[in-house]
Image (cartoon, rainbow, N blue to C red):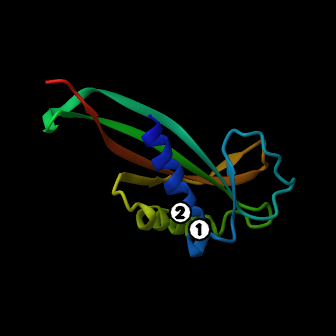
Amino acid sequence: MKQIEHSVSTLVRKIKRDERLKDYTFVKGFSGVEHPEPLTKYMIAVSTLDLDVGTKFVGENVGENLKGRLETATVKFRVYAPKNDGGDGLLTLCCDLSDAIEKCDTLNVCEDVKISPIAFDNDANTVYRDVVATLSFCVYEEVAI
């Protein structure tokens, strides 16, 4: 589990440093971080939605004294638009974010990236889109023969 948590955190750090995204504010999703009201600039809330630990092993043996298991993590980037923008730049930013996920995925663990339709957040009083990445990991463990 620590290996997956570390891999997800590393990927998110790389994405935050991507040249196209460096001017945007990233916050932890569900952290209770206060946001300006009204929102005056784009904000991206990052959260790990799901971690599915596989119960089935991949193959009998993937190497000498090793067995592997497939595990998936779902990471959501909720992109909020500033109140005065009306969401005009949301698609461009979400596409840049999607491209950054692909570019920063040096471990080749990203299976899928989806961009949601525009929705309205009553609490933030603004529109948003979600960029959701599904990551798959093959985790190995040593076994006695």
Q: Residue 100: which numbered mark, if any? A: none
Picture layout, residue 97 above or below residue 6: below
**Horizontal relation, residue 69 to residue 91: left or right:** left
Q: Residue at x 42, y 68 (%)?
A: 103
SS for tag 1? loop
Picture layout, residue 141 above or below residue 22: above
Report which quarter residue 18 is drawn in. Answer: bottom right
Quarter of the image with the C terminus is top left
Mark 1, Cα crowd under 10 Å, few <14 / some 14-19 / many 20+, is few
Q: Residue furthest bottom?
A: 19
- The location of residue 73, given as percent across then percent down, is 43, 40
**Horizontal relation, residue 60 to residue 139: left or right:** left
Instruction: Give the labeled residue for mark 1.
Output: 17
Q: Residue 14: which numbered mark, if any? A: 2
- The location of residue 15, given as percent across then percent down, is 54, 62
Quarter of the image with the N terminus is top left
Q: Residue at x 64, y 69 (%)?
A: 89
